[in-house]
Image (tube, rainbow, N blue to C red):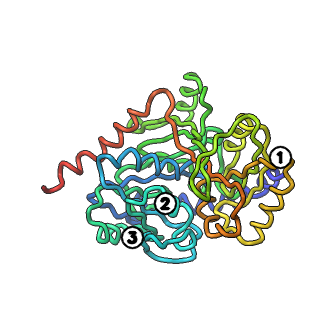
Amino acid sequence: MLKSFRYLLFPLSMIYGAIIWVRNWLYDKNILRSSSFNFPIINIGNLAIGGTGKTPMTEYLVELLLPAYKVAILSRGYKRKTQGYALATDTATALEIGDEPMQFHKKFPGIPVAVGEERVVAIPQLLHDRPETEVILLDDAFQHRQVRAGLNILLTECQNLFTRDFIMPAGDLRDVASSSKRADIIIVTKCKDNLSAASQAKISHELNPKDRQQVFFTEMEYGTPYSLENGDPYYMTGVTDVLLVCGIANPRPLQDYLTSHVHSFDMLRFADHHIFKIDDLKSIKTHYARMDDKNAIIITTEKDAVRLEKYSQELEGLPIYILPIRHKFLFNEAEAFASAIYSFIGPFKERKPA
């Protein structure tokens, strides 16, 4: 029914797509100008509306680069209640800087995390505030062309490649598929761990990358859940019953994971980036109380957890656990990906004055 309804939106998609195409053409012809920086800036983004794994990819890059470089993250801070540039502090909240930047700040407290809608303005401010910074990661900025990043990483979900999608609102694309040519690296995410070499070749052929573009494949790897209250680990088994509480764009891979790792699960789903309210907490408690197994646990995502933390008192006593997630490169290509990243950054360090 929903898909049939979206077919009726094709005329609107054609209008929206034409606007995006003209905008991109103006940038391609330098009528609208992008700003570039003589500084290593890596852009992580997608063409679709959420659900491709941008946040865990940003975290993957932080962990990859931290041993060698001083890294900073710049995000828009989607759905925050503030405006303008801000650098995350110890007192920052998800409402002030956004849930994803808050997740970065909590997971990597030693690195600067900043937010700003106008990235062309925010980048110089970030470098002024933290002049020791050697690499900036732009979270979710592929379609924002005011800044020309030195390296563009484009993510696309294996089960919903941008080549098979359509422009909003009839589809999920917020940018035209031809914009993929601006990417330096394309990563096909959320693949099955048993993806065959034949399927890899078929997908790569469908994406039709340029000679300069590298294509990688990843699956989502889930870690050990840890307590929202005190960080203690919880080891799920085949007899564990779960209430899944999540507000993410695409919970399907998470559902598939729980299906094969726990006895049973129920799901309480909210909209992506949902800001939890007291009534939501009541709903969570009601759903949990209805579960047959009183030893059941509540699982939520890292992104949802930063929006639930402010209700720690109201949630006290509930067994809420956070399920971490990260990218795992398939076909033994993690080193090749790392090499591509370091090859981009290396020349900047060589040119840096002593």
Q: CA distance from mark 3 to mark 1?
A: 50 Å
Q: Amino acid at mark 2?
A: Lys
Q: Which mark is residue 147?
A: none
Q: Label 1 sits on what residue type?
A: Asp
Q: Is residue 5 above or below residue 157?
A: below
Q: Earlier in the sequence, mark 2 or mark 3?
A: 2
* Position of 147 relative to 154 (above/below): below
The x and y percentages for residue 287 are 82, 57
Ranked by sequence position, the earlier of labels 1 and 2 is 2
Residue 238 falls in which quadrant of the image? top right
Looking at marks 3 and 1 on the same chain, the residue that comes earlier in the sequence is marked by 3
Residues 12 and 313: in front is 313
Horizontal placement of 335 versus 103: left or right? left
Query: Is 108 on the left or on the right of 207, as rendered?
Result: left
On the image, the x and y values in percent for residue 155 come to: 52, 46
Q: Amino acid at mark 3?
A: Ala
Q: Is residue 116 visible?
A: yes
Q: Work out whether 262 lies above or below 36.
A: above
Task: Give me the residue at 12% from left, 55% from top.
Answer: 354
- Residues 255 and 153: in front is 255
Q: Which mark is residue 293?
A: 1
- As drawn, the residue found furthest toward the left would be 354
Q: Secondary structure at mark 3?
A: helix
Q: Which residue is mark 2?
A: 106
> How many dots with numbers?
3
Eye-nearest disc, 2 or 3: 2
- Whether residue 172 is visible here, answered yes or no, is no
> Residue shown at 77%/47% (left/top)?
295
Question: Looking at the image, which is closer to me, 169 or 214?
Answer: 214
Label 3 belongs to which residue? 122
Q: CA distance from mark 1 to mark 2?
A: 32 Å
